[in-house]
Image (spheres, helix red, strand yellow):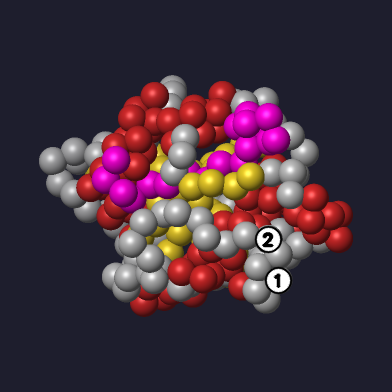
């Protein structure tokens, strides 16, 4: 078995993402910490943490990488009817603490979102790096949400939840189109799922993903704060 590097908490670095294992796909390193500086370096480098409470911190960079290019968001006929109804109200950064906790607590298969991860991503939110997107029903209840990191012209999606049918799909449509208008190049989805693929996500080689990051993480998007202006149907949908 190939040995993996153990990261030292006192040394802020990662091995190149290209050195990740093929099996399990993308496992790159262990250990380190969840400091905000390490997390920002990880995402800029195409790496993310994913582990359980009973494991050390595990760092991943799978190949291929599941991504969504904002202009490729797919709106099915049934989803279009939901959007036309105006049932959900979509906001950004209105309930980050609730969103990340619901992402952790509503997954039937369990969660990798540990208490330490909640604390670290909450600090990134205070720093203006991590953001939440919320879906509210007509009664003002939070019924869908997603959080992730915005670095340069890249958005790194971390997790989402949905308590009502189509809530997460509607917020994905709003997020993708708002990112497109703000000049974002890519939304990282990390690992493929049937839900994401139906929404227009696709898998690209890790080398292509890293090339996009090198081009985009240091360029500024066309906005200063997260306040959604895009509304359905919007232009070019």
Based on the picture, tell me whether residue 73 belongs to the magenta stretch.
Answer: no
**Mark 1: few/some/many CA within 10 Å (<14, 14-19, 20+):** few
Please state if 69 lies on the left or on the right of 20 as rendered: right
Q: Is residue 130 above or below residue 201?
A: above
Q: Which mark is residue 232?
A: 2
- The relative height of residue 100 versus residue 214 in the rendered view (above or below) is above
Residue at image position (51%, 34%) is 99
Residue 52 drawn above or below residue 48 = above
Please tell me whether mark 2 sits on a helix, a strand or a loop: loop
2 vs 1, front mark: 2
Provide the secondary structure element on which disc 1 rests. Answer: loop
Q: Nearer the viewer, residue 174 or 7?
A: 174
In the image, 45: left or right of 134? left
Q: Which quarter of the rendered picture does the N terminus lie within?
A: top left
Q: Is residue 38 left or right of residue 159?
A: left
Image quadrant containing the C terminus: bottom right
* Vertical comparison of 136 with 14: above or below: above
Please name the residue shown 75% across and 54% down the image.
83
Residue nearer the viewer, 57 or 154? 154
Whole-percent x, y for residue 117 in the image: 38, 33
Dot 2 or dot 1, earlier in sequence: 2
Q: Is residue 114 visible?
A: yes
> Where, by quadrant of the figure, is residue 41 drawn?
bottom left
Is 135 magenta? The answer is: yes
Residue at 39% across / 71% down in the picture?
222
Categorize mark 2 by other alpha carbons within 10 Å: few (<14), some (14-19), many (20+): some
The furthest residue to the left? 10
Pointer 1: what residue? 237
Q: Are marks 2 and 1 in contact (CB under 8 Å)?
A: yes
Marks 2 and 1, how far apart in space? 8 Å
Q: Which residues are magenta?
A: 126-143
């Amino acid at each position: 078995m190939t040995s993996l590097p153990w990261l030292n908490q006192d040394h802020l670095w990662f091995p190149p993402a290209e050195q990740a294992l093929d099996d399990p796909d993308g496992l790159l390193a262990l250990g380190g910490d969840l400091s905000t500086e390490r997390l920002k370096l990880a995402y800029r480098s195409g790496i993310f943490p994913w582990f359980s409470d009973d494991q050390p911190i595990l760092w991943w960079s799978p190949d291929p990488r599941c991504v969504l290019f904002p202009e490729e968001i797919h709106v099915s006929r049934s989803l279009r009817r939901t959007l036309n109804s105006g049932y959900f109200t979509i906001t950004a950064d209105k309930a980050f603490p609730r969103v990340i906790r619901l992402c952790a607590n509503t997954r039937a298969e369990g969660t990798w979102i540990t208490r330490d991860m909640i604390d670290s991503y909450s600090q990134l939110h205070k720093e203006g790096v991590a953001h939440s997107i919320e879906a509210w029903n007509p009664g003002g209840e939070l019924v869908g949400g997603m959080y992730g990191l915005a670095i340069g012209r890249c958005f790194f999606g971390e997790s989402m939840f949905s308590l009502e049918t189509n809530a997460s799909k509607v917020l994905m449509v709003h997020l993708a189109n708002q990112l497109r208008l703000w000049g974002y190049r890519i939304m990282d989805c990390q690992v493929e799922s049937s839900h994401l693929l139906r929404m227009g996500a696709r898998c690209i080689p890790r080398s292509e993903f890293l090339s996009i990051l090198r081009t985009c993480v240091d360029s500024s998007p066309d906005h200063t704060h997260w306040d959604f202006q895009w509304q359905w149907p919007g232009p070019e949908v």
